[in-house]
């Protein structure tokens, strides 16, 4: 499934300065029972966001009217744990298009890239600067420029560059996915398969 | 050029390399379960493309299945719908399906090795992070997302950059009561939950060569909990003995040919790793976790570390202890518990049940403990009965449930209630992992057994 093209995203951001945010927090297993990719955003951070009686927890950032935007800023080792792509779907479905952290878990990062959510890894110092800028003024915008591979805090002008390989960058900016690519080389795959031992 | 075990298997599966991009990796075997596959099958339908090699894909139902009354229709309509979707998708695409009630049904990472689907030198993926289990056989095995499940179904390939390499060496002899689970929890506690992110791990040294295949599976299973994509152990005679004669294992001339290849699957002398660790087996104690990630583990007789002594943010650490209802410096020994869970792809195999039985034999389940004992597969269940372990469990006041993932991730009704403590042989102690508000202490089957008969956290060595 091709996805949204990602070019330059300018948005306010939602701060979640917690480390090791795992996929069970992003979306608990009991909400993985759907057979279609619909509605996962409703259960994003379910148990941090709602009490057991489904009333909102007022101290959780997604319930704080001060913060909104298309960019989620998480602590170190964001997305650890399960391979459930539902976690990335929940982030997307809620309305985020970019997740910023000083370190990402591997599978979560890959899942984000595969559905068109851009994971932006910044230095711990820059992450602290982002949190400080949002704390100072929640209407502060971040500018995520994928072609230039930079992220800028608009209120301070501070900027940092981030890594992404050329192939994935091309996919993100064009809205292509890996299956399109793989289907194009099916003959090579068939030749390869004919010579595998298993 | 000197190559690592990982290099040998990875490089031999690269179909193409994309410039400044990923490798296109051919996948030999694909395991599928009900939770992470339906959207992938839907993707195939939307693109109107078939499964390229249905014979390389194996489907089983495990995550979302009840562990009692499996002969009855599944009550939860959403779970029933997901199981039905897998059954229909498998049938539509000619994929073998070991559903609920099938004699080969069980947890995907338990049945793969049991039937010889898992083989040395293979690339194996599944939409489940604990796919790393299969690395115990010298396979490259790792978890993938649903987009990648769709890629493998449609093209038998995924696109990933080659991970960096890490070797973890542990030499010496393990002490009394120290199991493979303790070895893994020890490594994770030393490396943290992100210490191996971006790496593929090889485990080497006396401890792993003398470990049983099931023990190796437990260790490799937990590789993901330190962030590694996967972990692997070089195949040896023990590996070959384990797989010989299983349903999907080659026979005759094909076996000889495969065996000749498998014999080459070891890291060359002098090959280098991006990172290497050395630990001493004698330093490892029976382990238990006290926090909300698998890296928050310690020797069972130690005290809970102080926030200033741990790496990372003190705020996150304190939040974690507050969730658990614990304080810095407290002993874990003697902490009251409410539930015991024996099972999962980490510790749901026959050796785990034997170890549990060894402790509970001649003792009684503590009255304050609810115990859920869940075999990893029907084959494990059958062995529990055949070996007389079921009688021992019954005599000690325990009941056995039917196979599945169960309370490891609590997708079905097996949920630990809010605020309750569970000593679990599973793999994750994340907040709410075993049910909203549940508190998990990860440990080995014998630590779980010791807790089950004493009603509190107990050093199993005092009962051996």
Image (tube, coloured by chain):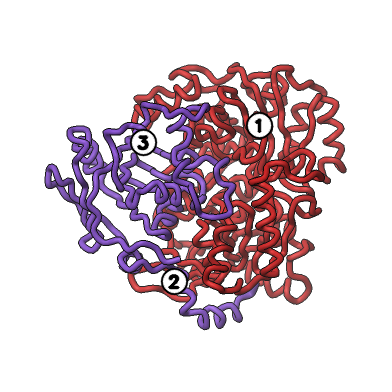
Chain colours: A purple, B red
Q: Nearer the viewer, residue A147 or B321?
A: A147
The answer as to whether the residues below labels 1 and 2 share one chain is yes
Give neighbour class at mark 2: few <14, some 14-19, many 20+ (Cα, 10 Å).
Answer: few
Q: Disc number at residue B177?
A: 1
Q: Quadrant of the N terminus of chain B?
A: bottom left
Identify residue for label 3: A62
Secondary structure at badge 2 equals loop
- Please indicate whether residue B132 sits to the left or right of residue B111 in the image: left
Q: Disc number at residue B411?
A: none
Identify residue for label 2: B1
Q: Nearer the viewer, residue B244 or A198?
A: A198
Q: Nearer the viewer, residue B139 or B464?
A: B139
Secondary structure at badge 1 equals loop
Cα–Cα gap, marks 3 and 2: 53 Å
Tell me which chain the residue with mark 1 is part of: B
Give neighbour class at mark 3: few <14, some 14-19, many 20+ (Cα, 10 Å).
Answer: some
User: Do the numbered discs 1 and 2 sit on residues whose CB atoms are within 8 Å?
Assistant: no
Secondary structure at badge 3 equals helix
Can see residue B357?
yes
- Please indicate whether residue B448 sits to the left or right of residue B170 in the image: right
- Name the residue: 78% across, 74% down: B252
- Name the residue: 60% across, 80% down: A195
Can see residue B131?
no
Give neighbour class at mark 1: few <14, some 14-19, many 20+ (Cα, 10 Å).
Answer: some
Quarter of image, res B463: top right
Q: Earlier in the sequence, mark 1 or mark 2?
A: 2
Cα–Cα gap, marks 1 and 3: 46 Å
Tell me which chain the residue with mark 3 is part of: A
């Amino acid at each position: 499934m091709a996805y949204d093209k990602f070019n330059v995203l300018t948005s306010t951001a939602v701060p979640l300065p917690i480390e090791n945010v795992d996929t069970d927090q992003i979306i608990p297993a009991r909400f993985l029972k759907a057979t279609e990719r619909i509605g996962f955003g409703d259960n994003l951070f379910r148990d941090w966001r709602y009490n057991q009686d489904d009333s909102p927890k007022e101290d959780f950032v997604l319930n704080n009217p001060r913060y909104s935007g298309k960019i989620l800023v998480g602590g170190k080792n964001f997305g650890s744990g399960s391979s459930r792509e539902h976690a990335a779907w929940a982030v997307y479905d809620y309305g985020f298009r970019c997740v910023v952290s000083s370190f990402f878990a591997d599978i979560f990062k890959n899942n984000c890239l595969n559905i068109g959510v851009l994971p932006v890894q910044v230095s711990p110092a820059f992450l602290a600067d982002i949190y400080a800028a949002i704390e100072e003024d929640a209407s502060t915008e971040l500018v995520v420029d994928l072609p230039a591979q930079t992220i800028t805090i608009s209120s301070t002008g501070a900027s940092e560059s981030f890594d992404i390989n050329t192939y994935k960058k091309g996919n993100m900016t064009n809205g292509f996915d890996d299956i399109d690519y793989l289907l194009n080389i099916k003959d090579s795959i068939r030749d390869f398969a004919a010579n595998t031992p298993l | 050029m000197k190559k690592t075990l990982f290099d040998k298997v990875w490089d031999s599966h690269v179909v193409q390399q994309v410039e400044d991009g990923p490798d296109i990796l051919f996948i030999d075997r694909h395991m599928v379960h009900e939770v992470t596959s339906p959207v992938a099958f839907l993707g195939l339908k939307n693109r109107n493309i078939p499964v390229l090699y249905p014979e390389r894909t194996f489907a089983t139902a495990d995550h979302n299945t009840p562990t009692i009354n499996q002969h009855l229709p599944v009550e939860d309509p959403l779970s029933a719908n997901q199981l039905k979707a897998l059954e229909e998708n498998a049938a539509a695409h000619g994929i073998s399906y070991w559903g609920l009630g099938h004699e080969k049904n069980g947890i995907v990472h338990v049945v793969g090795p049991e039937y010889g689907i898992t083989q040395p030198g293979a690339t194996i993926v599944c939409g489940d992070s604990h796919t790393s289990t299969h690395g115990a056989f010298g396979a490259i095995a790792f978890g993938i997302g649903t987009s990648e499940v769709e890629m493998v179904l449609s093209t038998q390939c995924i696109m990933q950059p080659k991970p960096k390499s890490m070797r973890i060496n542990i030499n010496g002899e393990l002490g009394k009561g120290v199991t493979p689970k303790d070895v893994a929890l020890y490594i994770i506690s030393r490396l943290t939950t992100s210490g191996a992110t971006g790496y593929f791990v090889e485990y080497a040294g006396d401890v792993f060569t003398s470990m049983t295949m099931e023990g190796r599976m437990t260790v490799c299973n937990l590789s993901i909990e330190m962030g590694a994509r996967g972990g692997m152990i070089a195949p040896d005679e023990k590996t070959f003995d384990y797989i010989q004669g299983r349903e999907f294992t080659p026979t005759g001339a094909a076996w000889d040919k495969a065996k000749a290849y498998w014999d080459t699957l070891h890291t060359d002398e002098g090959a280098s790793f991006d990172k290497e660790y050395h630990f001493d087996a004698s330093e490892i104690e029976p382990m238990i976790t006290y926090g909300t990630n698998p890296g928050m583990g310690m020797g069972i007789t130690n005290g809970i570390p102080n926030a200033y002594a741990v790496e990372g943010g003190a705020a996150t650490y304190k939040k974690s202890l507050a969730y658990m209802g614990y304080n810095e410096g407290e002993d874990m020994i003697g902490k009251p518990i409410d539930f015991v869970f024996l099972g999962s792809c980490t510790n749901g195999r026959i050796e785990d049940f034997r170890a549990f039985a060894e402790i509970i034999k001649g003792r009684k389940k503590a009255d304050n403990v609810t115990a859920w004992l869940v075999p990893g597969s029907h084959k494990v269940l059958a062995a529990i009965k055949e070996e007389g372990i079921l009688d021992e469990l019954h005599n000690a006041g325990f009941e056995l449930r039917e196979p599945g993932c169960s309370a490891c991730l609590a997708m079905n009704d097996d949920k630990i209630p809010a605020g309750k403590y569970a000593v679990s042989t599973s793999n994750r102690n994340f907040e709410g992992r075993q049910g909203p508000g549940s508190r998990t202490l990860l440990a080995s089957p014998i630590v779980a057994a010791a807790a089950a008969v004493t009603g509190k956290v107990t050093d199993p060595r005092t009962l051996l």
